[in-house]
Image (tube, rainbow, N blue to C red):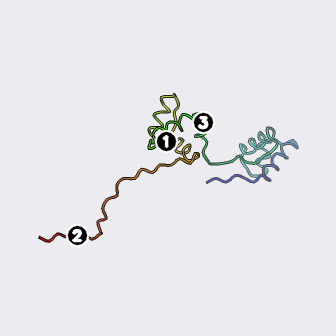
Amino acid sequence: MVKALSIDLGERVVAAVSAGASCHKAAARFGVSASSAVRWVSAWRLTGSVAPKRTGGDRRSHHLEQHAGFLLEAIEEQVDITIAELQALLKTQGVTASYGAVWNFLDRHALTYKKRQLMQPNKSARMSQQRG
């Protein structure tokens, strides 16, 4: 996984650009890519900081929060509803959601339901024998 470059390095590149250097020259001077220098300068102009944004995490399932009432009601009506069935219900409302997005929604609301198949008999267990 890629790690963000140091904030100190970004601040030095921004300081060099503020002192009159171009982004390309500042990037070459500090041994970073020109695109990194451009992004740092742009971020500094917009926010006043070159700190990297958060990485990872769920970015898509939060759009389902506006349909929370509908989803929670459907779950209340049918306790053992599957994620695929929830997806189909959302589709009737004109909402497209991936399996993972629905799962993350359920996880955020602490809703779990484990469907287990009947257990197969243990093959190594001793079987009673009938004598005839």
Residue 128 got which mark? Answer: 2
Q: In this orientation, which residue lies closer to the viewer: 100 or 3?
A: 100
Residue 63 got which mark? Answer: 3
Disc 1 element: helix
Side (left or right) of 122 relative to 3: left
Whether label 3 touches label 1, CB < 8 Å: no
Disc 2 element: loop
How far apart marks 3 and 1 lie (CA) works out to 14 Å
How far apart marks 3 and 2 lie (CA) works out to 57 Å
**Residue 90: % across, % down:** 50, 33
How far apart marks 1 and 2 lie (CA) works out to 45 Å
Q: In this orientation, which residue lies closer to the viewer: 46 or 41?
A: 46
Q: Which residue is mark 1?
A: 99
**Residue 85: % across, % down:** 44, 38
Side (left or right) of 19 relative to 117: right
**Residue 38: % across, % down:** 75, 41
